[in-house]
Image (cartoon, helix red, strand yellow):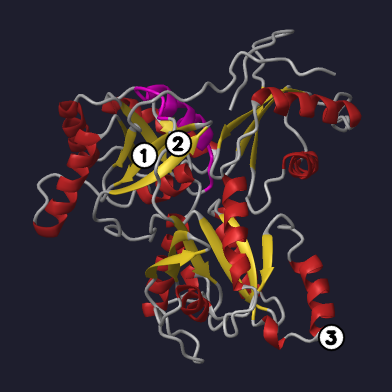
């Protein structure tokens, strides 16, 4: 079996400004839910009441190797007053500064007078507009989208931002409407690497920050929950300047927390998103808990480089080490690639190993595999272990490319869908061959679109 080069390989990104996509619409049509779907993580705050989003909020987004900025906006209304007028004005500014506008309508309600007024505002902007019929959660509601042709914005895109229905096709159309490919990140002077210190309450995050900074930068107390706001600190470790963010301990899921803890959880999530690498502190003397797992999942889902630091190692005896090894095998088996260090923030034991561990994880996070080497390796792998036969035939991998870094993202162009187990096998072998210690990897499959009987077609997202 050989890897054939398909027609739609991902092209190198050219230098230029990152294009901007504004998501607008009247209140409570699901704009923030759609933004979360586009960026692939739950970052925009969503509530089932109008008016949660007030400002223009930009997020970095990526699809099929192309980068762009998506801007969430508050609900637009004509003749709005007071605060609502300020919110509507922010939405109009977002439209004026965007390259493409995604106009969201609630398909369960249909086009309203406010939607029609918004269309007039959008026409005045002379910007390309993609009409989205949101909340089309089933086939019957998809048919309702036909009525939105009357708005005069062209074909409506029926989607369910909540469930993901139709979102891939919408993203393909957004990419087609973007004016130019996004930029290559040139090598050059960079600021201090950004490190988030995260973990459940009272595992020693503030103590570690004080240890590496060699001064009292953060309040330390044996009572859990001393830190609420993220605290930024510039710290010199191993001859290099690092920007550390000490965060509140996550006790509960964000949607279960309330009051101060709710906002602390949101800020901690924001600190992880803003970081390049996260140090997740675990208490080596205690059982790895569900809270620890949740923190680890948050870092992995955010696509950040990861170092796991087992703190309070000075309190670990031989019996605890025996059981901890078994816990690691059992509880951390989904992230065997994470860099691990055993430290004591209190005594300073092995804290000097932290900087090399961070560098190793970041190097993997930004590692790029040349396309030729990647495909040569993949040819040998798939010849030795082909995909299992399904329905009388096995899908083939035609070509692979690395679409991006930070974290590494790979696209596999195939003749059909691949089993989840085979994808996990490819990821495991990819790590064995090329490393990527301390970094998550994203693998996506792009089956070739059939153009007819015997037609080869092009790759399809």
Q: Position of residue 143 (x, y in %)?
A: 47, 32
Q: Quadrant of residue 6?
A: top right
Q: Nearer the viewer, residue 19 or 175?
A: 19
For label 2, the SS is loop
Residue 64 belongs to magenta span: no
In the displayed orientation, state which residue is furthest to the bottom. 222
For label 3, the SS is helix
Alpha carbons under labels 2 and 1: distance apart: 21 Å
Decide: few, some or many residues near mark 1? Use Cα within 10 Å; few <14, some 14-19, many ≥20: many
Task: Identify the mark nearer the N-term, 1 or 3.
Answer: 1
Decide: few, some or many residues near mark 2? Use Cα within 10 Å; few <14, some 14-19, many ≥20: few
Q: Is residue 209 visible?
A: yes
Task: Identify the mark nearer the N-term, 2 or 3.
Answer: 2
Determine whether 459 is above or below 232 in the image: above
Task: Identify the mark nearer the N-term, 2 or 1.
Answer: 1
Q: Is residue 167 left or right of residue 439?
A: left
Residue at 18% x, 52% y is: 87
Q: Can you tell which of label 2 and label 1 is closer to the viewer?
A: 2
Q: Quadrant of residue 366?
A: top right
Q: Can you tell which of label 1 and label 3 is closer to the viewer?
A: 3
Alpha carbons under labels 2 and 3: distance apart: 48 Å
For label 1, the SS is strand
Determine whether 8 is above or below 359 in the image: above
Q: What residue is pinned by disc 3?
A: 319
Residue at 46% x, 45% y is: 39
Q: Nearer the viewer, residue 329 or 345?
A: 345
Q: Is residue 298 visible?
A: no
What segment is highlighted magenta in the picture? 163-183
Q: What residue is pinned by disc 1?
A: 69
């Amino acid at each position: 079996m050989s890897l054939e080069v398909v027609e739609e390989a991902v092209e190198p990104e050219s230098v230029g400004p990152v294009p901007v996509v504004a998501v607008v619409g009247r209140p409570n049509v699901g704009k923030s839910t759609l933004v979360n779907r586009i960026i692939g993580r739950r970052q925009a705050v969503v509530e089932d009441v109008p008016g949660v989003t007030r400002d223009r909020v930009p997020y970095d987004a990526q699809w099929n190797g192309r980068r762009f900025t998506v801007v969430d906006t508050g609900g637009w209304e004509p003749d709005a007053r007071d605060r609502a007028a300020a919110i509507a004005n922010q939405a109009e500014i977002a439209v004026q500064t965007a390259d493409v506008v995604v106009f969201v309508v609630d398909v369960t309600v249909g086009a309203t007078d406010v939607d029609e007024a918004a269309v007039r505002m959008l026409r005045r902007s002379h910007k390309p507009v993609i009409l989205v019929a949101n909340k089309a959660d089933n086939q019957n509601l998809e048919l309702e989208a036909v009525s939105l042709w009357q708005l005069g914005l062209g074909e409506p895109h029926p989607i369910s931002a909540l469930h993901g229905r139709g979102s891939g096709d919408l993203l393909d159309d957004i990419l087609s409407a973007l004016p130019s490919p996004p930029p290559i990140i040139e090598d050059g002077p960079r600021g201090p690497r950004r490190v988030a210190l995260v973990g459940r309450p009272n595992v020693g995050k503030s103590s570690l920050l004080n240890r590496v900074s060699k001064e009292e930068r953060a309040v330390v107390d044996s009572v859990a929950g001393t830190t609420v706001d993220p605290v930024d600190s510039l710290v010199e470790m191993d001859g290099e300047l690092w920007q550390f963010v000490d965060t509140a301990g996550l006790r509960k899921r964000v949607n279960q927390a309330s009051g101060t803890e709710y906002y602390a959880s949101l800020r901690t999530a924001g600190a992880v998103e803003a970081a390049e690498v996260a140090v997740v502190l675990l208490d080596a003397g205690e059982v790895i808990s569900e809270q620890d797992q949740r923190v680890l999942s948050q870092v992995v889902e955010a696509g950040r480089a990861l170092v796991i630091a087992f703190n309070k190692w000075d309190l670990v005896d031989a019996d605890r080490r025996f059981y901890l090894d078994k816990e690691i095998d059992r509880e951390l088996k989904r992230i065997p690639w994470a860099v691990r260090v055993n430290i004591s923030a209190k005594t300073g034991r092995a804290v000097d190993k932290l900087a090399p561990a961070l560098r190793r994880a970041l190097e993997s996070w930004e590692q790029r595999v040349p396309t030729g080497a990647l495909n040569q390796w993949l040819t040998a792998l798939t010849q030795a272990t082909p995909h299992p036969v399904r329905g009388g035939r096995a899908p083939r991998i035609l070509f692979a490319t690395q679409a991006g870094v930070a974290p590494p993202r790979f696209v596999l162009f195939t003749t059909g869908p691949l089993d989840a187990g085979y994808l996990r096998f490819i990821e495991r072998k990819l790590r064995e061959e090329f490393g990527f210690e301390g970094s998550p990897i994203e693998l996506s499959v792009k089956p070739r679109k059939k153009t007819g009987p015997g037609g080869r077609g092009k790759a399809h997202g």
